[in-house]
Image (spheres, rainbow, N blue to C red):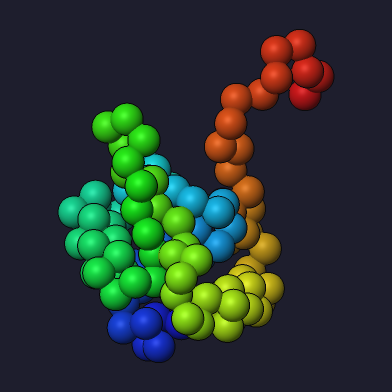
């Protein structure tokens, strides 16, 4: 949808992922989308070098989130949210409603 604007479908998916979940790591994004890890890492580096996202090491994992100092962050998030609002419901369920934390012990399904 926005791939022509961003120049790459992988960049679009990364930005949608971070918009939906707040942050993420490369292997998790690759697993969700079924994209090779190398392609994800290359685009994450490009986005980080451009100042759009920021990476932070937590243990051996690098977590990526939107860079709060990016001057057009508010506008970017609004654009991504509007684009996500028109995504097909099956794509939203498949990619953006995945549990990221374990269920509390004893909690009913």
Q: From what the image shows, is residue 43 above or below residue 106?
A: below
Residues 50 and 39: in front is: 50
Give the image location of residue 36, x and y in percent.
24, 52
Left or right, 23 with respect to 35, comes to right
Q: From what the image shows, is residue 45 above or below residue 21?
A: below
Determine the image quadrant of residue 85. Answer: bottom right
Q: From what the image shows, is residue 9 above or below residue 104?
A: below
Q: From what the image shows, is residue 84 above or below residue 21?
A: below
Of all residues, the one furthest to the top in this rendering is 106
Write the residue at 37% across / 59% down.
54
Give the image location of residue 69, x and y in percent.
46, 70
Write the residue at 56% across / 52% down.
21
- The image shows a total of numbered marks equal to 0
Give the image location of residue 19, x and y in percent.
55, 62
Residues 73 and 88: in front is: 73
Write the residue at 63% across / 73% down.
81
Of all residues, the one furthest to the right in this rendering is 108
Left or right, 99 with respect to 40, comes to right
Q: Is residue 30 visible?
A: no
Give the image location of residue 43, x and y in percent.
26, 65
Residues 67 and 24: in front is: 67
Q: Is residue 101 visible?
A: yes
Of all residues, the one furthest to the bottom in this rendering is 5
Left or right, 107 with respect to 28, comes to right
Q: Quadrant of the C terminus?
A: top right
Write the residue at 37% across / 87% down.
4
């Amino acid at each position: 949808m926005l791939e022509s604007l961003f120049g790459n479908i992988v960049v679009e998916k990364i930005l949608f992922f971070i918009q939906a979940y707040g942050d993420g790591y490369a292997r998790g994004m690759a697993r969700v989308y079924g994209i090779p890890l190398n392609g994800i890492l290359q685009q994450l580096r490009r986005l980080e070098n451009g100042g759009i996202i920021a990476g932070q090491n937590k243990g051996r994992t690098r977590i990526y989130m939107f860079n709060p100092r990016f001057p057009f962050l508010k506008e970017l998030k609004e654009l991504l949210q509007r684009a996500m609002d028109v995504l097909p419901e099956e794509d939203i369920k498949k990619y953006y409603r995945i549990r990221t934390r374990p269920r509390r012990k004893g909690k009913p399904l």
